[in-house]
Image (spheres, rainbow, N blue to C red):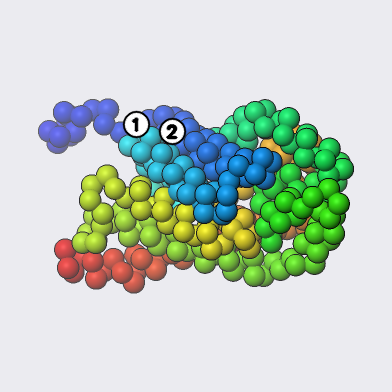
Amino acid sequence: MPPPETQARPNADPSLMRQVVAEMIGTFLLIFFGCGAVHAAVLTGAQQGLWQVAIVWGVAIMLAIYSVGGISGAHINPAMTLAFALWRGFPKNRVLPFVAGQLAGAMLAASVLFVIFGSQLDAMEREKGIVRGQPESVVTAMCYGEYFPNPGGVASGNAQNWQAKYMEWRTLRSGNLAFIAELIGTLILSFVVFALTDERNRGQPAAGQAPIFIGLTVAALISVIAPLTQACFNPARDFGPRLFASLAGWGSAALPGQDGLSWLTVYIIAPVAGALIGGGVYEFGVRPVAQEQA
């Protein structure tokens, strides 16, 4: 016979389907606001400086976690789902459904942004003489997938000098450094998430405040890493919009992108490795001390 508390709450845990839908909604919110800020900055000049884009991403994280965290935990990131499965006992049979929900939410958000910013995308491409799908169309594809170094400087060039800026940008690629930057950024994010959600951590924020500090962590990381790689830290954030862009006319300029493997190595493998390492560093290097002090 189940214990009394189980009898009192027979349907306490949401079903897998509801959790997957929650992950889809949470990731939609993240990408809609975050990539929406990128669209506004690149296409309209609406944002003044990197910090304004970064803080929108931070607020998007907070809103997503507060909105669906009580249902699915608001992983909204395949790298974090894998880290939770490895270090925190998240059921491994739920990893793939969660990742599928996250990718679906990211693609849906990208499609909505494509519709509402469609005229601005067309206007920028006409102004610069860009043919969507050609290599130089990274200038607008960057609103969806990510590139290194950040091609924002190319996008800001006027009609006369943007091609020169584009050629200069192509010479600055460094896949190894981009990989390291994404790995370190996601490692830090994962470490902080594990610390802020550890009930034995005496430095844990007050109840209900962890999403605020997670969001601020993301904003701070974007402020440092975005000039290098556009700051991914989340395979769904890059691959979902990148896949949508490849289907929406950007083709090989979006996927595989600037070369054949960076979409995989820099924006999927590096964040996953960083999240696993960051979670492990906390679980084995810090949490035992927190347990002793609890």
The amino acid pointed to by label 2 is Ala
Q: Residue at x 45, y 63 (%)?
A: 188
Residue 284 seen by the camera: yes
Q: Is residue 209 left or right of residue 18?
A: left
Residue 133, position in %: x, y? 83, 42
Neighbourhood count class around disc 1 (C-alpha, 10 Å): few under 14, some 14–19, many 20 upward: few
Q: Residue at x 71, y 30 (%)?
A: 118
Residue at the far left in the pictured view: 4
Residue closest to the eye, 28 or 114: 114
Give the residue at mark 2: 22
Residue 91, position in %: x, y? 40, 46
Q: Earlier in the sequence, mark 2 or mark 1?
A: 1
The secondary element bearing badge 1 is classed as loop
Q: Residue at x 72, y 51 (%)?
A: 156
Answer yes or no: do the residues labelled 2 and 1 have beta carbons within 8 Å? yes
The amino acid pointed to by label 1 is Pro
Residue 198, position in %: x, y? 28, 56
Residue 82 seen by the camera: no
Q: Residue at x 23, y 28 (%)?
A: 10
Q: Nearer the viewer, mark 2 or mark 1?
A: 2
Give the residue at mark 1: 14
